[in-house]
Image (cartoon, helix red, strand yellow):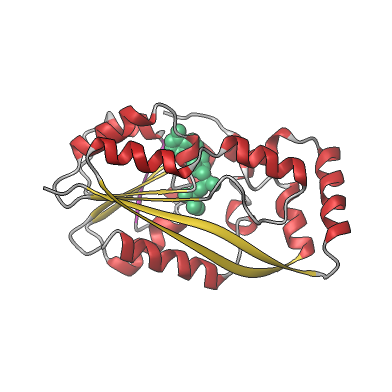
Amino acid sequence: MNTPNHFDSIADVFNRIWYFSDNYKDFVLEHILHDLSLNSEDILVDIGGGTGTFTSRIMEKSLLQKAYCIEPSSPMCIEAAKLGNITALCLDAHAFLTTETPFNKLLLKEVIHHIDNRETFWHDIYNRLPIGGKLLIITRPQNIDFPFFQSAKTAFSKNQPPHEIFESELKNCGFFVETKYQNHTFTLPKESWYEMLRYRFMSDLCIFSDEEIEEGIQEIDNYYYEDILEIVDNLIFMSAEKKE
Ligand SMILES: C[S@@+](CC[C@H](N)C(=O)[O-])C[C@H]1O[C@@H](n2cnc3c(N)ncnc32)[C@H](O)[C@@H]1O
């Protein structure tokens, strides 16, 4: 099932514009491998896996039994399907759970704020996971340190539920939950960051017109004098395990 969304419009440039640094990718990847305790017997489902970059890198590193990239945007899913070592399914999170695909590990990287009716979703996952099965949410707090213009910060925090809500929903469902907070700093030339904003690399930015984006970039430019931006990404890694 193809559910069109903002990411349809940036699928062809997603891998290029959603690029912070190699170091950043390795840092996130190490977290995923560790927090999901991945090994060669696992079947991983990457919900909202986008163009499959992380799904495929995880597969390379852990030699999983199988890895699925679940992605509702058809243009994004077409990119993921080009990667030979994973299976891409063009489905949203809820539609995926109506399939009988078996899995024991689940990744939700930068997607949880897009999923509605979460309580049903957690419940279905809990019932489908075997004992020892795990999920990992990678998300951000409502207030972030990204060099955004003020109205972009406001839009971001409006779309981002407080992460404590996910924690209590998962605990109520029976999961054992662990939350880690990690700030990761990287540098980017201002022009690269501005290009990301112009492409509206985050869906929170799609409410702004071209003129508003340019005004926003000017606002940032007046605030940061250096040509290179030092960017802090405030990440939250929340893992949940189904125990006996
Ligand atoms: C910011 S991207 C993250 C992509 C990928 N996880 C990564 O980190 O590279 C968010 C992705 O979630 C997908 N998405 C949006 N709503 C979704 C839903 N209801 N179920 C599953 N995926 C969804 C979007 O199409 C998009 O590809």
Report which quarter residue 210 is drawn in.
top right
Residue drawn 15% across and 45% down?
130
Taking the image as shown, residue 58 lies to the left or right of residue 124, namely right
Residue 166 in the image: x percent, y percent? 40, 40
Residue 145 in the image: x percent, y percent? 65, 56
Taking the image as shown, residue 3 lies to the left or right of residue 58, namely right
Which segment did they paint magenta? 86-90
Residue drawn 21% across and 49% down?
104
Outermost bottom residue? 23
Relative depth, front residue between 237 and 63:
237
Answer above or below: position of 143 versus 99: below
Instruction: Decide whether the magenta segment is chiefly helix, strand or loop.
Output: strand
Residue drawn 51% across and 37% down?
161
Residue 63 seen: yes
Residue drawn 22% across and 46% down?
103
Answer above or below: position of 36 versus 126: below
Quadrant for the N terminus in the image: top left
Taking the image as shown, residue 118 lies to the left or right of residue 190, namely left
Question: Residue 175 colored magenta?
Answer: no
Total labels drawn: 0
Report which quarter residue 90 is drawn in.
top left
Residue 64 in the image: x percent, y percent? 25, 61
Residue 57 in the image: x percent, y percent? 40, 63
Residue 89 seen: no
